[in-house]
Amino acid sequence: MSDSVTITIDGRNIEARPGQTILEAADAAGIYIPRLCSHPDLKPIGSCRVCTVVVDGRPQAACVKPVMDGMVVQNSTPELLQHRRNIVDMMFVEGNHFCMFCEKSGNCELQAMAYRFGITAPQYPFQFPEKEVDASHPDILLDHNRCIMCARCVRASQELDGKNVFQSIGRGFARKIGVNGERALGDTDMAATDKAADICPVGCIVRKRVGFEKPIGQRLYDTRPIGSDIEEVRA
Amino acid sequence: MSKPRVATTSLAGCFGCHMSLLDIDDRILQLIDLVEFDRSPVDDIKHISQRCAIGLVEGGCCNEENVHVLEEFRANCDVLISFGDCATMGGIPAMRNNIPLEECIDEAYRSGPTVYNPQGIVPDDPEIPLLLDKVYPAHEVVKIDYCLPGCPPSADTLWAALTALLSGQPIELPYELLKYD
């Protein structure tokens, strides 16, 4: 069996290793496929669907779809860009995202995705749902208003920390991140040293007392769009 | 040819976006060469006097007066721009949106920790605009042509948008000028 397969992404031939996902192969080739729930240290679950690409005519989540020889992948079609924009718009209106006072602002992947897509305002009506803030843990804040249900914290706690602090609970619009404790995060075995404390793409799980450390202009996405680091591989 | 007219207003906002407009510094001299200000807090004209090329709306709608002003702007401006996070997304005033209105009023006028109001009177003078059930971003009330987010949008963002429009170009912000904070 060959140790290399060839796929095309937007007409460009890419060498990939069998077993790689489309997303991993694209990253290695310097092609950025936008994603939110995917994280290089975690098993992919294809939950947010921002990484949707069209594979041989069918939409697929690039983070979970393995490469196969001869695959034809479309990444940057107007339809896919619109589809991704729609998802990001929905995340903005389904939560309460107040960027102006959020300590994650400037380092937030959801916000950075909206910047990259050039979103000036969501196209859907704001829902302003009622959500809770869990400040019970001495070192970590859990603000459900900002959650996008990517489940990175769930996976990081299990896969990286060997714990089981977070779980998705509920269904549909009522779905949320629950904690494995008597009442709140402070009752769990979550520690400030946990990988799960730093894995949140948005400001839902943040460390206390370190917010606004970096001034505006020096934050992660102030001047460089998200994905620039991946695209530079190609340059 | 007469100069294009610009109207501006602050609805449910904090005037910070207007401060940011003033923050274009000496470019304001170029701006007043380029445009004539119609209704605006800058000149205190109370109603739009004639057709305007550009309307700038800061803040969303939290009461019926905001809606009336916004409708006046939409009816009289060729291009209507909402600027700032309050106008584009609801912003800080929209933090009341998941609290029932009665609870908000109770906290503000009856039971807040710094309130002295032994008779429990809630202002209800007919002169006072009625509150809406929620705070709405401008584009959920009337059609908005361009949104310029930011808290506030930087002076450079506003300058880039205005100069683009005044030279007949669509607003296309470079990456650094599109920010939500």
Image: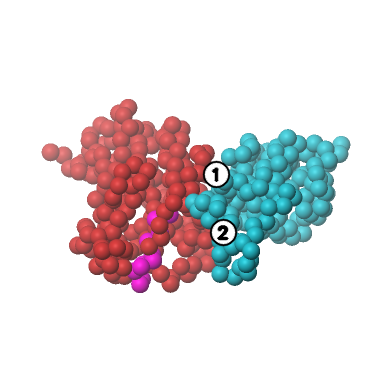
Chain colours: A red, B cyan
Position of residue B172 relative to residue A154, above or below, is: above
Residue A190 image position (x, y, % from top left): 27, 66
Q: Of tags 1 and 2, which is closer to the observer?
A: 2
Identity of the residue drawn at 28% across and 51% down = A168
Note whether B166 is above or below A203 in the view shown: above
Q: Is residue A51 left or right of residue A43?
A: right
Q: Residues within 10 Å of mark 1 (few under 14, many from 20)?
A: many
Residue that protrudes farthest toward the left in the picture: A1
Which SS class for mark 2? helix
Where is residue A26? Give x, y as percent. Answer: 33, 44
Residue type beneath disc 1: Ala
Q: Which mark is residue B106?
A: 2
Horizontal and vertical percent position of residue B175: 55, 50
Residue A205 spot, x, y in % from top left: 37, 61
Residue furthest top in the image: A57
Out of B2 and A197, give the one closest to the viewer. A197
Q: Which residue is mark 1?
A: A121
Q: Do the residues under discs 1 and 2 have CB atoms within 8 angstroms?
A: no
* Closest to the observer, B103 or B51: B103
Which residue is depicted at the point 87% across and 36% down?
Answer: B1
Would you say residue A140 sits in the magenta stretch?
A: yes
Q: Please state if B131 lies on the left or on the right of A110 as rendered.
A: right
Disc 2 crowd, CA 10 A, few/some/many (<14, 14-19, 20+): some
Relative side of B32 to A112, left or right: right
Looking at the rendered structure, whether the residues under marks 1 and 2 are on a common chain is answered as no
Instruction: Give whichever of A168, B114 is nearer the camera.
Output: B114
User: Of A183 and B44, which appears nearest the observer?
Assistant: A183
Looking at the rendered structure, the secondary structure element under dot 1 is loop
Alpha carbon distance from label 1 to label 2: 32 Å
- The structure residue drawn at horizontal position 31% and vertical position 63%, both measured from the top left corner, is A184
Tag 2 subunit = B
